Image (cartoon, grey):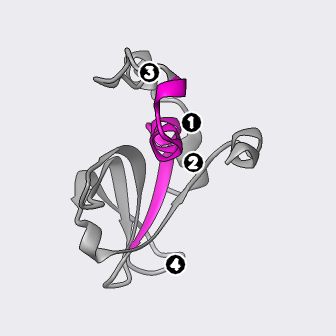
Amino acid sequence: MSFANLTKPFDNTLLNNIITNAAQMNESSLTLGRRHLRKWLGRPFRVVISDGRVLIGYFNCTDKDANIVLSRCAEYLEEGKDARILGNVMIPGKHIVSVSVDLPKDEALEL
């Protein structure tokens, strides 16, 4: 499973729509950071953690401690090696070295 392959839609169309409990909030009432987080929901994330592993999955949520939850996550121990499929994972913020999000070019320019 590669980072590029995660941009395909789910087979189950219900999973293609991300639902939040803050749907009633309009974009103008959100801070810039919260607007970015909302845009990133359901997008492929690549997280490098302190022991060198790379986790790639879909961004579900974060919290005030910078913990990140990914779904359909795969773990890579070394570049170019096979992935180990993990499913849903919670990554403690204290172990996160870097995070990157895969956005379409037009959306990435807006950031």
Q: Are marks 1 and 2 in contact (CB under 8 Å)?
A: yes
Magenta highlight on residue 93: no
Tell me the SS state at disc 2.
helix
For disc 4, the neighbor class at 10 Å (few under 14, some 14 to 19, many from 20) is few
Circle nearer the viewer, 3 or 4: 3
Magenta highlight on residue 31: yes
* Residue 19 picture location, percent across and down: 36, 22
Q: Quadrant of residue 82?
A: bottom left
Q: Which residues are magenta?
A: 27-48
Tell me the SS state at disc 4.
loop
Which residue is under mark 1? Answer: 8
Circle nearer the viewer, 1 or 3: 3
Marks 1/3: CA–CA distance: 13 Å
Tell me the SS state at disc 1.
loop
Which residue is under mark 4? Answer: 79
Which residue is under mark 3? Answer: 17
Q: Amino acid at mark 2?
A: Asn
Above or below 64: residue 61 = above
Q: Residue at point 35% right, 66% down?
A: 75
- Which is nearer the eye, 14 or 29? 29
* Residue 49 picture location, percent across and down: 35, 76
Which residue is under mark 2? Answer: 5
Circle nearer the viewer, 3 or 2: 3
Marks 1/2: CA–CA distance: 6 Å
Q: Amino acid at mark 1?
A: Lys
Q: Amino acid at mark 4?
A: Glu
Q: Amino acid at mark 3?
A: Asn
Q: Residue at point 38% right, 83% down?
A: 52
